[in-house]
Amino acid sequence: MIAALLFAMLAQDRAPIFPDLEEARVSRRCTRSGEDITVCGDPGQKRYRMGEIDPRFEPRPLRPNFTLPGGGKGRVEAVERTVGGVSAPGAMVTLDIPIGKKPKK
């Protein structure tokens, strides 16, 4: 049933969806002229080029030191470890957490 519908759709005589490339032409004026196909556009590639990057998107330096709530401090480091005779990258996180009562001021 579905195959019969597909064949019926293929057999219809109608205009093609996409025109031939010979019919399309680039016009400098971009005006409509009857039933002709007019393609308007800029032949230059300027619109595809990226402009200057906004300073807020520039890469910032990494700050491996951070503070924790309650007076603690932390640090992140990249290290290279040897595991089974093979070097592998790794990361170390060091936390300095104060334990006990806070000192009196």
Image (tube, rainbow, N blue to C red):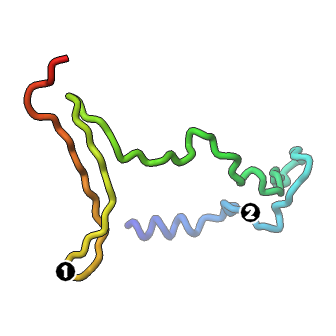
Name the residue that disc number 1 marks.
84
Residue at the (28%, 59%) spot, across then down: 91
Residue at the (29%, 72%) spot, across then down: 88
Quadrant that contains the N terminus: bottom left
Residue 35: mark in rendering: none
Against 60, is 70 above or below?
above
Task: Give the left or right position of residue 13, taking residue 7 as reference.
Answer: right
Against 10, is 105 above or below?
above
Secondary structure beneath dot 1 equals loop
Task: Pick the residue in front: 68 or 99.
Answer: 99
Residue 81 in percent (x, y) is at 26, 70
Residue type, numbered disc 1: Gly
Labels 1, 2: front one: 1
Residue 32 in percent (x, y) is at 87, 45
Residue 22 in percent (x, y) is at 83, 68
Q: Residue furthest top?
A: 105
Residue at the (15%, 23%) spot, across then down: 103
CB atoms of marks 1 and 2 within 8 Å: no
Quadrant that contains the C terminus: top left
Task: Identify the image quadrant of residue 78.
Answer: bottom left
Q: Distance of mark 1 from mark 2, alpha carbons?
A: 65 Å
Name the residue that disc number 2 marks.
19
Against 29, is 83 above or below?
below
Task: Pick the residue in front: 90 or 22.
Answer: 90
Q: Earlier in the sequence, mark 1 or mark 2?
A: 2
